[in-house]
Amino acid sequence: MSEHSGDIISAILILIIPVLLTVPLRVLWSWWIGNEPEHLHYKERFTSVIDSGYPIKNFRAELDRTARQYDIDIERQTRIETDMLNPLDMRHFLLVPSLVVWPILSIPAGFVFLPLLPVTRFFEWILIEKRILLLVLKLVKRATGWDVVWMERPGDPSRPPEPVIAAIHRLPITVLLGVFAYLIVSYLSFSFNVIAAITVGVYVILVAAISIIRAATSGSLVFIDARNRKVIPADSFVEQLIGPWVGVGLFFLLSRQIALSSTIRDGTLSDPSFFAITVVLVLYIATLIGISLELSFFRTRGRAVEVAFEEQVEDIMSPDQYSFVRHLGRYQLVDAGINNPES
């Protein structure tokens, strides 16, 4: 086996370590959410409610009775419901180890986070206050022929979701954009410090813009694709646009970078093992940045951005409001006869 092949194998092993850590983390998460028989029974009942399409608040008294019947306290009940509405997968558990090393990585994460806040505010001004995002929505509607409507999201306003789970659910796109930016910029034949600086600039711009778009579309705005019989929530549409590019791009870029690291760059990054370590560090640093963004933006400005954008859509398009329900095995779009998304 050549030395280069050995370096590639070492790099692959380094990248596999975060994946292996997801196994015990998923077990611990399942225990924290609840995996006892009584918890599983409650999950089945809650699943039947959200699958019906009717508002959860209509069944709140029945759900609470079921929880008491199985001796489930309100904290556990909230965790179960939030996990059902915001499920976590392997991508989320890849990020958890960053919480262990945060004292070490918090300093570089802080240097990236500080310019992120004003840039995010700048994109809020451009996309929301200057109505550029509304213009984009109108162009999407015109190009696709879809209808724009309001549709109440699953959830119960009287029982707020577990904030930790809801925050973790949003993290992967924010974090993977950091790795994506690093893999693209690392193709440049610059020193490590220059590559790091350019990566920070690209990442800050990408995350700031995407955060505003995700906050604005996280409400009840929905596309109706009558031709293909599809109901597409606006936030899911954004995820579908970003996710495949980031996912496939990461796999392609990472595999190519590891295999050709010694031929496409000089210096320390030419070592596949060292490059793999930097990728893991970028993953964890971006996670800390994503958590900070959740605390500083989504919990403070996120709702205001959503409301402002929905008011613009209401003023220009006046979408009808519908409920998507299932009754006796048949799905129906029911016109609620309301033109106010807050109703």
Image (cartoon, grey):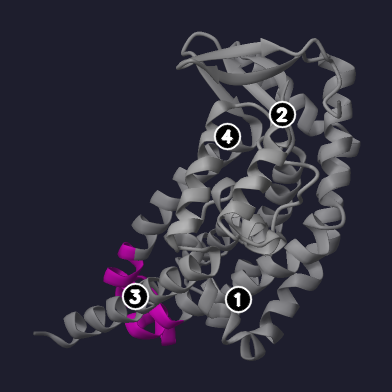
Q: Amino acid at mark 4?
A: Val
Q: Quadrant of residue 137?
A: top right
Residue at which label 3 appears: 20
Label 2 sits on a secondary structure element that is loop
Choose between 296 and 145: the one closer to the eye.
296
2 or 3: tag closer to the N-terminus: 3
Task: Calculate the distance from the C-alpha at mark 1 to the C-alpha at mark 4.
Answer: 39 Å
Residues packed near mark 3 inside 10 Å, few (<14), some (14 to 19) or many (20 plus): few
1 or 4: tag closer to the N-terminus: 4
Q: Residue at coordinates 59% horizontally, 60% vertically from top-left?
A: 71
Q: Amino acid at mark 1?
A: Ile
Asked if residue 269 is among those painted magenta in the image, a careful observer would answer yes
Numbered mark located on residue 285 in the image: 1
Q: Nearer the viewer, mark 1 or mark 2?
A: 2
Magenta highlight: main SS:
helix
Residues packed near mark 2 inside 10 Å, few (<14), some (14 to 19) or many (20 plus): some
Asked if residue 341 is among those painted magenta in the image, a careful observer would answer no
4 or 3: tag closer to the N-terminus: 3
Q: Quadrant of residue 132?
A: top right
Which residues are the magenta region? 255-277
Q: Nearer the viewer, mark 4 or mark 3?
A: 4
| Whether label 4 touches label 3, CB < 8 Å | no
Residue at which label 2 appears: 152
Q: Residue at coordinates 61% horizontally, 61% vertically from top-left?
A: 168
Q: Position of residue 92 (x, y in %)?
A: 51, 62
1 or 3: tag closer to the N-terminus: 3
Q: Amino acid at mark 3?
A: Leu
Residue at which label 4 appears: 49
Label 1 sits on a secondary structure element that is helix
Task: Calculate the distance from the C-alpha at mark 4 to the C-alpha at mark 3.
Answer: 35 Å
Q: Is residue 253 above or below residue 19?
A: above
Q: Amino acid at mark 2?
A: Glu
